[in-house]
Every structure is written in C-alpha cells, then in structure tokens.
Amino acid sequence: MNEMYNMALSLHSWSAVAVLVMIFINLYILISAKELAKYKRVNSLYLIPLQITVLGALLFTGIVMMAAKHLHFSVENIIMIILGVVLIVLEAKRLKALKYLSTKKEHALEVYKPYARTILQVEFGLVLLMSLWMWFV
C-alpha cells in the first residue's frame, strides 16, 4: 500500500508540473497567435485534449492518494479540490468565449487575447502557489 501511495505522490507532483507547462504553452501560443482560425484549430486539435488529459491525471492521482489515506480530509486536500474545480470552471469559461468568437470579425482575436491571457495567468499563478505551498510544507 505504501508503494502505491509513493508512486501516486510522485505522479501527482509530475502532473502538477505538467499542468504548469501546459498552461505556459497555451499562454505562449495565445500571445504568438496572429490568425483566429489557426489558433482555434491548434487549440481544438492539440491543446484542449492534451491539457484536459494532464489535468485529469493530476486530479486522478490526487483521488488515488485520498483513497490510499482512507479519505482523510485535510486543509490541503480541501484546497486542492477547490483548486481543481476552479481550474475546470476557468478553462470552461475561456473555451466558451473562444468557441463563440467569429472568424469573420476583423479584430476578434485582439479582443479575446486579454481575456484569455488573464485567465491563463490566474490559472498559472494558482497552480504555482499551490505547488510551492505543497513543496515547502
């Protein structure tokens, strides 16, 4: 049982790093995007499935660790659950706004960029703060 918990903890830590990397890559692609149609295509084909998979791995390993601890809730666990829900809601808002952007409008991407950049920066900051807190505790 202890080996499973240690492996899940290791995978959870690496998944948190992967989430940070995915958010950073998403932010970089957003900033460097010039055309809305290409950005939407890259986002829907590559970024969304990969980011959801990485976030799912993070949440799944957290659930495995909770089960290994016999569902013992601590302050850290509750905050991580809330953070997971917040990340899912923020991503849903960002992707919903992207979905309804019209490729026919001239400056639609320039209007969307500050909104999406703010959401991605908040996500990055929240995951980084949580990771640093867990690393130092």
Image (cartoon, rainbow, N blue to C red):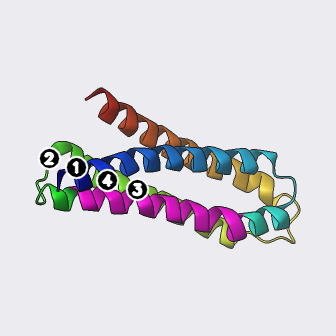
The local secondary structure at tag 1 comes to helix
Which callout, 3 or 4, points at the residue further toward the start of the chain?
A: 4
Q: Circle 4 sits on which residue?
A: 8
Q: Earlier in the sequence, mark 4 or mark 1?
A: 4
Image coordinates of residue 71 in percent, x first then y, are 13, 59
> Crowding at label 2, few (<14), some or many (≥20) Cα neighbours within 10 Å?
few
Residue 70's place in the image compared with 80, above or below, is below
Q: What residue type is labelled 4?
A: Ala
**Residue wearing tag 1:** 77
Crowd band around label 3 with a 10 angstrom C-alpha radius: few (<14), some (14–19), many (20+): many
**Closest to the observer, 124 or 1:** 1
Q: Distance of mark 2 from mark 1, alpha carbons?
A: 5 Å
Q: Do the residues labelled 2 and 1 touch (CB within 8 Å)?
A: yes
Q: Distance between the residues labelled 3 and 4?
A: 10 Å
Residue under the point 26% across and 61% down: 64
Tell me the element at label 3: helix
Q: Residue 74 carries which label?
A: 2
Magenta stretch: includes residue 70:
no
Eye-nearest disc, 2 or 4: 4
In the image, residue 123 sits, relative to residue 107, either above or below, namely: above
Mark 4, Cα crowd under 10 Å, few <14 / some 14-19 / many 20+, is many
**From which residue to which does the magenta span run?**
43-65
